[in-house]
Image (spheres, helix red, strand yellow):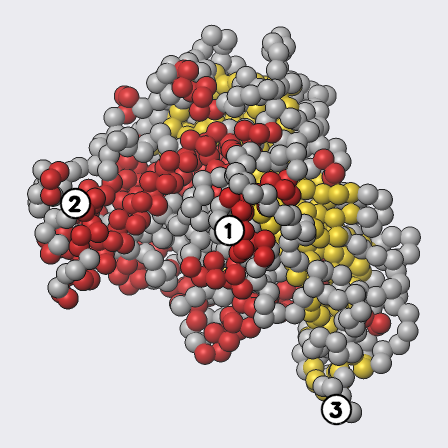
């Protein structure tokens, strides 16, 4: 292979795992669920251990004689050399962790796993002993701790505060290792380096809203590592005996699985060339994205090209990666091979960038409470996107086994930390315990454990009458958590879908009354003085240019459109969308004036760009709900992607809201079965005749053009959507500005202006305004609140991102969304930036609950 001494047919092998030389901890510590009743920390280890977690209040000084919370647990066996645990430390009876307080933690490990409830004795190996997190304890400290004034001397976290004005959390989604650009999850480490010693400023939480791994769109080199290292850790191979024999050989071929996944597994991803399939591959992927421990040091992944593309390597005469630019001129029959080679080198370069920032990500996760929810790529693109998809994939044993592998890995590596009780003692933990027991068997594919895994992960048998059919007893994937100033309600928009249309139509993400009762109504409303945060991987409110114009047009042109591009937004099933809004915003009890009021913040990802939308809601009789007045506000905060920017997302960033109105109105009616409602709206300028729409089914929705008034009849509910742009006025950059390294500085507005100027982006950012509405670069969202009396309340989303070519990110896009729930009377007039003060109120505003005046 050029001057490397490697020739065709002699491929450098991927360095094997040397289990003996690996540290005990393969991934972690990761701080997961933290509330006043306990702290959960996740570890993945190479050997079985009993683990004791102890939590201490305060960020500095000698540790007290007794911890504030303690817990002990034994790891669960996933494979011969892979053992995992989410250990929960709980306060003594009657105790609780104080809000808004820095807490440090320690962990001790014992090879004696007997007496599982007895704490590991003092003096046992801990995080900073040689060979536990790293071969050298001093290096382990550097990898888990921050330095500087006030920085804790142990891994730490902050408990959530007692008032919304003190809240500061981050959220993000969509992290593909070989995606373009630098990993925005590492930005959290940048923030902590500045603020870890300032308890009042330090982020308390991180919410990861989906696609924490990509199972379908995997670089061939990364699949190769997951296959080899996963097999070494689990100590076994996994075959799919119901596959044709010749196709099973493709399981060993990274880059060659596309036909296999489509024809045999009936998957629909067009990026399945290196799809994860086995349990070992899924488990290894989580270890590869949470930690750099398994990544080979000093090995050039580019040299593995002949491993996957022997023919192309031969055609190109065994090129050297550093001389690829000399291959620009080739004969036509070699151009396809050259394109394959350059694509491979590009993916290797993106993987190199990803691996380089992994230590920062690991350190941030060891010092921030983190909550997660799956989207589709945790299993595959288009997961449960249509009833025909479910029926096709679940029609074979190997299809169902594949689903079980992906969902089981999610349960262990993500969900255990969300709901530790679902894996703990007592009836609540039965499903999780059964799953872990089945995974611990020498062969998880044997009939007995395979049946348990399928049941406890909820693998379907197919669909019936539009509903996904599965055995009872699955783990619940939705969850809620209450803290002093806010609550989290994480909804499952993937496995509880209902397909109300044809076999290839878009789904209702949530529809059934039992699903609403379990996900929303089981988390009681906290009132308008607290913050309700809903985690929905698919944004409840979307980007209007795509969701209301482009994607509906695609569905009309391409009936089987989901095979080309998934279209599964909330808005694509209008009835399900309005039912969700009614159930979510109408959940609060009536106030003294009889009006139900609720403020909700919705976190979402999925779409690979960030933005902020507000919807104000008023109803006298909401859809699928009892009669009664409702006033609500929903702030949609979307941060996406962490590492998957592309030319298309950057194009949207430059486009912003150029072709959309700054606000839009949906008016809704409950149409009795068999009846009709005629709705009149003002005609276009110069026309004396109204525009009539006849509604024949419920919900009946009319979207009046901007500025045209409803003439009648009064709607039962109204949604006013407002699209927000960057709030801060542009500062004037100074000559010879330098890029600030740490944020927030004393004057953040000026620092951001200087950053833009020094990055060479002054015109695009400060003048042209790119990124001030839509952010298509890799980003992570910061969320804070201003929380005054009554309606003087706002949520602020600040998107941190980098200009091209910059290592340091900055808080470049800031959206301030007021959260009024309003009096019982008045109009829902738009006040988002871009809505002129003298513009007409939205159509139908006069007819909403308690509004004075009559429809025109």
Do the residues under discs 2 and 3 have CB atoms within 8 angstroms? no
Q: Residue at x 53, y 41 (%)?
A: 736
Q: Position of residue 13 (x, y in %)?
A: 17, 37
Looking at marks 2 and 3 on the same chain, the residue that comes earlier in the sequence is marked by: 2
Say whether marks 2 and 1 touch (CB < 8 Å). no
Q: Disc 2 or 1, which lies upstream in sequence?
A: 2
SS class of the residue under badge 2?
Answer: loop
Q: Position of residue 123 (x, y in %)?
A: 47, 7
Question: The C terminus lies in which quarter of the figure?
Answer: bottom right
Whether label 3 touches label 1, CB < 8 Å: no
Marks 3/1: CA distance? 47 Å
* Picture layout, residue 343 above or below residue 674: above
Residue 190 in view (yes/no): yes
Q: Which residue is mark 3?
A: 687
**Would residue 73 appear left or right of 178 to someone viewing this image?**
right
- Determine crowd level at label 2: few under 14, some 14-19, many 20+ residues with C-alpha closer than 10 A: some
């Amino acid at each position: 292979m050029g001057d490397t001494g490697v020739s065709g047919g002699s491929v450098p092998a991927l360095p094997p795992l040397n289990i003996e030389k690996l540290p005990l901890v393969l991934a972690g510590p990761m701080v997961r669920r933290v509330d006043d009743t306990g702290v959960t920390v996740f570890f993945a280890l190479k050997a079985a251990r009993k683990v004791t977690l102890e939590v201490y209040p305060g960020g500095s000084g000698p540790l007290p004689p007794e911890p504030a919370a303690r817990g002990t647990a034994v790891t669960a066996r996933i494979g011969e050399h892979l053992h995992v645990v989410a250990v929960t430390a709980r306060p003594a009876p009657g105790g609780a962790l104080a809000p808004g307080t820095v807490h440090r933690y320690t962990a001790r490990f014992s090879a004696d796993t007997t007496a599982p409830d007895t704490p590991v004795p003092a003096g046992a190996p801990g995080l900073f002993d040689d060979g536990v997190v790293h071969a050298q304890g001093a290096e382990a400290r550097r990898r888990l701790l921050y330095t500087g004034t006030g920085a804790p001397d142990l891994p730490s976290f902050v408990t959530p505060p007692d008032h919304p004005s003190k809240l500061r959390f981050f959220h993000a989604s969509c992290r593909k290792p070989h995606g373009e650009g630098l990993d925005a999850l590492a930005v959290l480490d940048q923030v902590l380096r500045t603020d870890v010693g300032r308890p009042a400023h330090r982020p308390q939480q991180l919410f990861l809203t989906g696609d924490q791994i990509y199972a379908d769109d995997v670089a061939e080199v990364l699949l190769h590592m997951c296959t080899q290292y996963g097999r070494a850790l689990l100590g076994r191979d996994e075959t799919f005996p119901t596959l044709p024999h010749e196709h099973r050989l493709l399981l060993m071929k990274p880059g060659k699985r596309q036909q296999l996944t489509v024809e045999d597994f009936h998957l629909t991803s067009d990026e399945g060339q290196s799809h994860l399939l086995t349990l070992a591959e899924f488990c290894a992927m989580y270890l590869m994205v949470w930690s750099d421990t398994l990544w080979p040091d000093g090995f050039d992944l580019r040299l593995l090209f002949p491993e996957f593309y022997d023919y192309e390597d031969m055609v190109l005469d065994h090129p050297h990666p550093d001389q690829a630019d000399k291959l620009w001129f080739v004969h036509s029959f070699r151009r396809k091979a050259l394109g394959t080679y350059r694509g491979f080198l590009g993916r290797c370069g993106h993987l190199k960038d990803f691996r380089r920032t992994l230590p920062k990500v690991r350190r941030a996760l060891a010092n921030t409470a983190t909550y997660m929810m799956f989207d589709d790529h945790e299993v595959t693109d288009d997961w449960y996107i249509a009833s025909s998809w479910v029926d096709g994939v679940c029609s074979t044993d190997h299809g169902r086994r594949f689903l079980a592998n992906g969902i089981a890995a999610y349960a262990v590596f993500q969900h255990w930390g969300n709901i530790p009780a679902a894996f703990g003692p007592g009836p609540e933990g039965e499903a999780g315990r059964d799953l872990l027991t089945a995974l611990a068997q020498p062969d998880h594919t044997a009939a007995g454990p395979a049946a348990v895994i399928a049941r406890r992960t909820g693998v379907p048998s197919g669909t019936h009458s539009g509903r996904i059919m599965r055995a009872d007893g699955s783990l619940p994937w939705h969850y809620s958590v209450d803290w002093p100033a806010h609550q989290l309600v994480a909804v499952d928009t993937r496995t509880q879908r209902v397909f109300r249309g044809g076999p290839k139509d878009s789904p209702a993400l949530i529809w059934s009354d039992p699903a609403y009762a379990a996900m929303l109504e089981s988390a009681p409303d906290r009132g308008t003085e607290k913050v309700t945060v809903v985690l929905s991987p698919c944004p409840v409110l979307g980007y209007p240019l795509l969701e209301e114009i482009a994607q509906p047009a695609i569905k009309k042109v391409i009936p089987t459109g989901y095979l080309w591009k998934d279209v599964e937004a909330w808005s694509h099933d209008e009835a399900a969308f309005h039912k969700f809004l009614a159930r979510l915003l109408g959940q609060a009890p009536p106030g003294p004036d009889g009006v139900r009021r609720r403020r909700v913040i919705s976190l979402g990802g999925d779409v690979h760009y960030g933005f902020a939308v507000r919807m104000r809601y008023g109803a006298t009789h909401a859809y699928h709900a009892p009669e009664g007045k409702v006033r609500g506000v929903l702030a949609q905060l979307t941060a996406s992607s962490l590492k998957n920017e592309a030319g298309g997302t950057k194009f949207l960033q430059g486009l912003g809201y150029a072709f959309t109105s700054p606000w839009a109105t949906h008016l809704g009616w409950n149409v009795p079965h068999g009846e009709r409602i005629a709705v009149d709206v003002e005609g276009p300028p110069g026309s004396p005749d109204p525009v009539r729409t006849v509604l024949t089914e419920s919900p009946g929705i009319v979207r009046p053009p901007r500025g045209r008034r409803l003439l009648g009849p009064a709607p039962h509910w109204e949604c006013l959507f407002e699209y927000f742009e960057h709030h801060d006025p542009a500062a004037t950059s100074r000559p010879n500005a330098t890029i600030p390294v740490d944020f927030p500085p004393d004057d953040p507005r000026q620092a951001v202006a200087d950053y833009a100027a020094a990055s060479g982006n002054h015109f695009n950012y400060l003048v042209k305004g790119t990124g001030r509405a839509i952010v298509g670069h890799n980003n992570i969202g910061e969320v804070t609140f201003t929380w005054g009396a009554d309606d003087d309340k706002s949520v602020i989303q600040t998107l941190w991102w980098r200009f091209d070519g910059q290592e340091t990110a900055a808080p470049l896009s800031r959206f301030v969304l007021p959260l009024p729930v309003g009096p019982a009377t008045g109009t829902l007039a738009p006040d988002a930036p871009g809505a002129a003060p003298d513009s007409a109120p939205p159509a139908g505003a006069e007819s909403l609950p308690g509004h004075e005046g009559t429809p025109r």
